[in-house]
Image (cartoon, grey):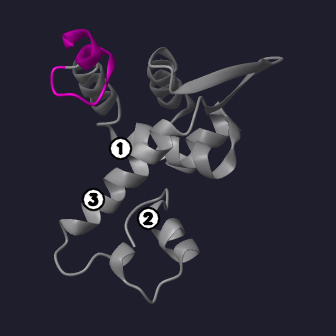
């Protein structure tokens, strides 16, 4: 029966708990969060384009992308001398979205995503805006 607990990643004594902590650690950087949001919104982007979007140097963005690639959150594709990146799957994007929605709760009052009068498209756009606060 203990073997079943270890296989289920959502049990407190799962072998995946420490790995989940590493995932959160990887996302505990504003530049990497912005990179994830930019890739989610645009699909595939070059390092230079990502650098423009997140307002960092291409060298800095490349270092962040290398970490995200090692964590298997992004996938790289070479085209000549340019590298293009995209999200490996939807999970990092979902974690970032959920973190932003949770952050809205820290502002006090009723978070924007709980307002029934806002349409989902507006909520999604506002919750995932790359540049900064609203």
The disc, 3 or 2, on the residue closer to the chain's N-terminal end is: 3
Comparing labels 1 and 2, the label whose residue is closer to the camera: 2
- Quarter in which the C terminus is drawn: bottom left
Comparing labels 3 and 1, the label whose residue is closer to the camera: 3
Q: Residue at x 26, y 60 (%)?
A: 103
x%, y% of residue 51? 57, 40
Residue 127 has which mark? 2
x%, y% of residue 125? 53, 67
The answer to whether residue 69 is visible is yes
Q: Are marks 3 and 2 in contact (CB under 8 Å)?
A: no
Q: Residue at x 51, y 31 (%)?
A: 61
| Residue 49 in the figure: left or right of residue 16 | right
Stretch in magenta? 1-13
Residue pointed to by mark 1: 30
The answer to whether residue 56 is visible is no
Return the residue found at the far top. Answer: 3
Inter-mark Cα distance, 3 to 2: 10 Å
The disc, 1 or 2, on the residue closer to the chain's N-terminal end is: 1
SS at badge 2 = helix
Which residue occupies the foreground of this view, 102 or 29?
102
Residue pointed to by mark 3: 102
Which residue occupies the foreground of this view, 104 or 59?
104
How crowded is the residue under tag 3: few (<14 C-alpha within 10 Å), some, or many (20+)?
A: some
How crowded is the residue under tag 2: few (<14 C-alpha within 10 Å), some, or many (20+)?
A: many
Which residue occupies the foreground of this view, 117 or 26?
117
């Amino acid at each position: 029966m203990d073997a079943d607990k270890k296989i289920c990643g959502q049990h407190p004594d799962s072998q995946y708990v420490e790995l989940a902590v590493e995932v959160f650690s990887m996302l505990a950087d504003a530049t990497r969060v912005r990179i994830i949001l930019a890739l989610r919104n645009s699909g595939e982007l070059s390092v230079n384009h990502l650098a423009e979007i997140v307002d960092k140097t291409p060298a800095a963005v490349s270092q962040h992308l290398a970490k995200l690639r090692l964590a298997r959150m992004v996938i790289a594709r070479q085209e000549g001398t340019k590298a293009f990146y995209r999200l490996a799957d939807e999970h990092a994007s979902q974690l970032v979205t959920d973190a932003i929605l949770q952050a809205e709760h820290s502002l006090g009052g009723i978070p924007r995503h709980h307002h029934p009068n806002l349409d989902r498209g507006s909520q999604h756009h506002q919750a995932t805006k790359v540049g900064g606060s609203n």
